[in-house]
Each structure stands twice: as C-alpha cells, then as structure tokens.
Image: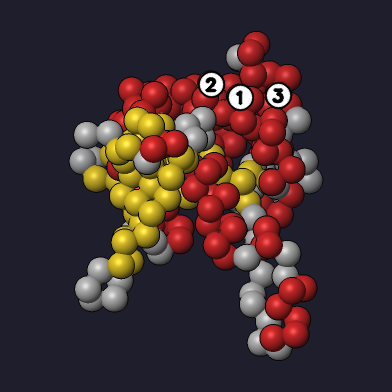
Amino acid sequence: MSIAAHRRKLRKSNRKNPSPLDEEISRAVYDIELTSPKLKTALSALHFNTAKEFDIGRSRRCVVVFYPLRFLRKMHKIQSLLSSELEKKFSGKQFVFISQRKIRQRPKNIYKIQDVPRSHTMSSVHDAMLDDLVYPADVVSRRTRYLIDGSQQHKVYLHLKEKERVEHRVDAYAVVYKRLTGKETVFGFMSNPALQQVAA
C-alpha cells in the first residue's frame, strides 16, 4: 500500500494514521516544497514528528511543529521563511518550531545520577526548548521570582533589538511554554544585557 506523497513529511510512525492537524501541516509543507524555489531543496530533506495547536487568546491559535533534533541547524536556516509561508496558508495562526528532545528520569540510586547526560536533564531540555521557541531572537537573561504562596514566576528577556520583530508573538511564547513545561513565564526585553538594563 503506497503512502500519499505529502505524508512523507511526517515521521514513519505517523504516516499511516496521522492526526487531522498532522495531515493538514504535512500537506501544507509538501505544497510549499513544491511551489517555493527558496525552500524546495531544504524541505526535501526534512520531515517533522508531530504538531500541536494551542489557543493563545483573542481568537488566535498557535501551532507548534516538533521536528527531529538532528535537523536543528537546517531548520534554523529556513525557519523564518517557512513560518511566514505557513502563516499565509493558515490565517489567524502563528507557527513556532521546536526540536524534539528526550528527558531522562533522575535515577533513584544516587550513585547513578552522573550517568544522565546534562543535555537530557529536565532543566536543560526546558532551556533548549525556550531557545527554539523564540528563535531567531536570543534569550539574553532569565530570572526566577519566588512568590509568597510558594509558586515561581519565570521572567525571560529577549534583546530589545528584536522587539519589533517578535513583540506580537510573546503572548504565544508564554502560553506554549507553560503548556509544554508547566512554567509560568513572562517575556520582556532588555536594552543592555551586559548591565542587565530592562527596557520599559
């Protein structure tokens, strides 16, 4: 039984019975590959794992596309253009891309804790996820605020020079990051990271 051409943009385990959203995204990505000279070569070698959609308020939606970690550098080269093309096809939706990473559970045996690579710890994966989420902007500072009720609020600062390009997306970043990690996060901008000067 042959598989529809557009489903080859999905990982093998999802090709036979993709979710409706995965089906939509794979069709759109395949169509962009066929019609966009700038993206054709790059997309021909890429596929994605799955996609999730979140409500970010004000009748807006955000689609998170997860792709294999090995495609990280290739995806960064085309991410802005691919996001723009997908947003043209899906009016009212924003697109972000996150590479899929695995979190390894902390061993109960304290003598085996060092067996877990740093890149597979929860904090490292969450930090990398944040970097992917805001790309091509850079995270220049992170702060954690401890509230009197015992909860935490995370503050993430992007460089002020990126404000015009990403300010309309920070609501989506906050919602998506909380849904994926459980962390309440506020995004802001910093004018001088070296001096930790927060922009008004």
Q: Name the mark nearer the viewer: 1 or 3.
A: 1
**Residue annotated with mark 2:** 81
Q: Is residue 22 visible?
A: no
**Residue at the image position 42 percent from the left and 50 percent from the top:** 142
Q: Is residue 129 visible?
A: yes
Q: Give the class, few, some or many, for how many residues have Cα within 10 Å of label 3's Cα (few <14, many ≥20).
A: some
Distance in Å between CA atoms under marks 1 and 3: 8 Å
- Amino acid type of the residue that numbered disc 3 sits on in the rendered structure: Ala
Label 2: state its secondary structure.
Answer: helix
**Residue annotated with mark 1:** 78
Along the polypeptide, which appears first: circle 1 or circle 3? 3
Residue reaching furthest to the front: 195
Task: Please indicate whether residue 33 sits to the left or right of residue 185 in the image.
Answer: right
Position of the C terminus, as image quadrant, is top left
Q: Decide: marks 2, 1 in contact (CB < 8 A)?
A: yes
Label 1: state its secondary structure.
Answer: helix
**Residue at the image position 37 percent from the left and 59 percent from the top:** 144
Q: Decide: marks 1, 3 in contact (CB < 8 A)?
A: yes
Position of the N terminus, as image quadrant, is top right
Distance in Å between CA atoms under marks 2 and 1: 6 Å
Q: Position of residue 52 (x, y in %)?
A: 47, 50
